[in-house]
Image (cartoon, rainbow, N blue to C red):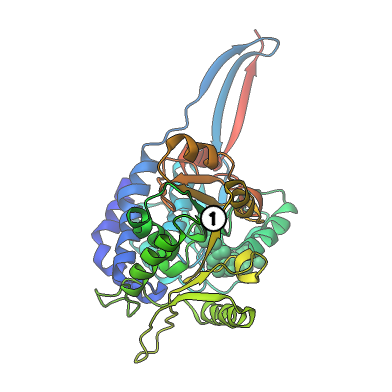
Amino acid sequence: MSSLLDKISEHREELIVLLTAERGGTLAQARWEIDLVTKALGPAVLQMKLIEEEQDVQHIGHITKRYTPIGVVGAISPWNLPVFLSFTKILPALLAGNTVVLKPSPFTPLTVLRIADYVHELLPPGVLNVVTGGDDLGPWITSHPGINLITFTGSTFTGKRVLESAAATLKRVTLELGGNDPGIVLSDAEPEKIAQALFDSMFLLCGQGCISLKRLYVHEDIYSRVIEALVAIASATKVGDGFDPHSRLGPVQNQLQYKRLQSVWDEIKRSGAKVLFRGDVPTNTEGLFFPVTLLDNPSDDASFVTQEVFGPIRSIFKYKNLDEAIRRANNTSYGLGASVWGSDPVQLRAVASQLEAGTVWINQHAIRNPLVPASAYKESGLGVEFGPEGLESFCNLQVIATKQ
Ligand code: NAD
């Protein structure tokens, strides 16, 4: 496993260029993603262990609790973080003793295929297999009787189909799905101090992040200062060619995604929502550049508020009453992440514990560490990724009970 990570590091520069070309985004984002695999995810997985436990228990006798490999793992990944989200599946699956059939997104198969080429010589034949093609490959994998577990990252819409298809052979299933993460800014927050972190988590990967902050609720006492600070940062953010080192945000990933964003924008215009900021995009290139867009208090019922917007459009809401803000933040079928921002640790903790999401951040958002489990509430997923709990999901749990 560690030589597999070394192999990726050895080809780092080439992989960064390839990833930028196929995923969009910027060189800096691609560099961050490759390093995330080799310097954070890989070492974290390598230090995890599944430990057998022994215990004497009344009536049943001496108990050994152990983990066994599940067999063949079918891994299906999306296009927004194609390398990281493939390796969050490959590495723990292999560590637990399984073999893997990976299906990357048809929009972004190249970098993982290249890595598979580089690491093949390190693994016995058939241990890691990458199959590519259109979306129709997905159901072949999820219904295949020779595959024992499906680990899927993608939209909630597709996740439901995966679960349905996997039910026929009762496969184990882990689903990491869409999100519509809220953030609540309390009245004692310091707008100028938190604005950059808010902006970065809203426009992470050009807004194409599952745990990107998508709905921001700001107390009325500091609303104008928060939006002023966000607009100032947005104005200074260059959207452009991902290979240009001055670009902070690159193009959106594919034509379908771009068209979806355009129809969201048409809906915004039809709804009459107030546009706080709409940035510039380069006009002299063919890239799918979409302007950074900030909305001021759109209706809670608007489709671009209730649905996940996977691109650089974000809504900001003014609130007066905190209970009301918590209710609106939770009023969603998603439950991936959420955050609360402010100064009083007691109040921050009290608000955090009322938010319905698998991860609730305090004074940060969209920060992950592979040693810490990631799970979801509601329609944002099923099961756990990362941490020892995530590793366990790649195994059968077996109890051996000896009569005493
Ligand atoms: P998607 O659901 O369209 O596709 C994901 C993968 O599923 C692709 O490889 C695709 O080919 C495959 N697929 C399509 N139809 C299938 C089927 N019927 N059966 C099996 N597989 C099928 O998602 P996307 O557009 O690639 O990615 C964006 C979505 O992923 C967003 O909703 C985002 O929030 C979500 N996402 C979630 C996480 C997370 O950790 N929770 C991380 C990244 C992205």
Count of marks overlaid on the render:
1
Judged from the image, the quadrant occupied by ligand 1 is bottom right
Q: In this view of the protein, can residue 83 be seen by the observer?
A: no
| Residue 144: image location, x then y, percent | 66, 58
Residue closest to the far front? 221
Position of 134 relative to 385 (above/below): below
Q: Considering the image in quadrants, where does the C terminus appear?
A: top right
Q: Give the residue at x 38% y 83%.
A: 281
Farthest right residue in view: 168
Q: Residue furthest top?
A: 404
Q: Specify few, some or many for label 1: CA neighbours under 10 Å numbering under 14, 14-19, or 20 or more.
A: many
Most extreme residue toward the bottom, as rendered?
A: 284
Taking the image as shown, residue 22 lies to the left or right of residue 395, namely: left
Q: Position of residue 158 (x, y in %)?
A: 64, 64
Q: Residue at x 72, y 51 (%)?
A: 169
Left or right of 364: which side holds 106?
Answer: right
Helix, strand or loop at mark 1: strand
Residue 20 percent across, percent down from the top left: 34, 72
The yes-or-no answer for disc 1 within 8 Å of ligand 1 is no
Give the amino acid type for the residue marked by disc 1 in the picture: Pro
- Snapshot quadrant of residue 292: bottom left
Q: Is residue 33 visible?
A: yes
Q: Which residue has dot 1 on it?
A: 182
Residue 387, above or below 259: above
Q: Nearer the viewer, residue 312 or 393?
A: 312
Task: Identify which residue, 36 or 57, lies in the foreground.
Answer: 36
Looking at the picture, how far across and down is residue 338, in whole percent? Answer: 52, 50
Residue drawn at x 24%, y 59% is 10
